[in-house]
Image (cartoon, grey):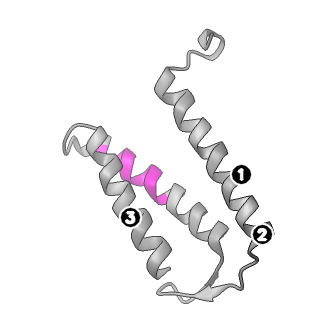
Amino acid sequence: MLDWMAWTTATAAFFVCIACLLVIFTTLAIKYPETPRIGVLRIETTRGDRLFITLLGSAFINLAWLGLEIAPQPYAMLACLIYAAAVFRWV
């Protein structure tokens, strides 16, 4: 089923999760509009901005994890979740 682009099930699940996050955040933005806030970066951010920062940072965490061979790759997800919690709390 996923042979047309040589996707693995894990890759497909990743993009499905990203799509679900975008739908959830769009729904939240419509139902509960948010005023931007200023965090430790000293820039105004909304939920969507923080999601983007989290996704971008998580990509770099995973690339560094692969490059430095720190531990098995699934442990990088734990690091990404901690990073995401920090971004949504303080950025």
Write the residue at 52% across / 87% down.
39
In the picture, measured across the screen, residue 48 lies left or right of residue 68, that is right
**Local SS, label 2:** helix
In the picture, measured across the screen, residue 90 lies left or right of residue 19, that is left
Looking at the picture, how far across and down is residue 13, in whole percent?
A: 53, 32
> Which of labels 1 and 2 is toward the front?
2
Decide: few, some or many residues near mark 1? Use Cα within 10 Å; few <14, some 14-19, many ≥20. few
- The residue type indicated by label 1 comes to Val
- The residue type indicated by label 2 comes to Lys
Write the residue at 29% across / 38% down.
73
Task: State the residue position of label 2.
Answer: 31
**Local SS, label 3:** helix
Write the residue at 61% across / 14% down.
2
What residue span does the magenta drawing correspond to?
57-65
> Which of labels 3 and 1 is toward the front?
1
Task: Residue 66: name its quadrant.
Answer: top left
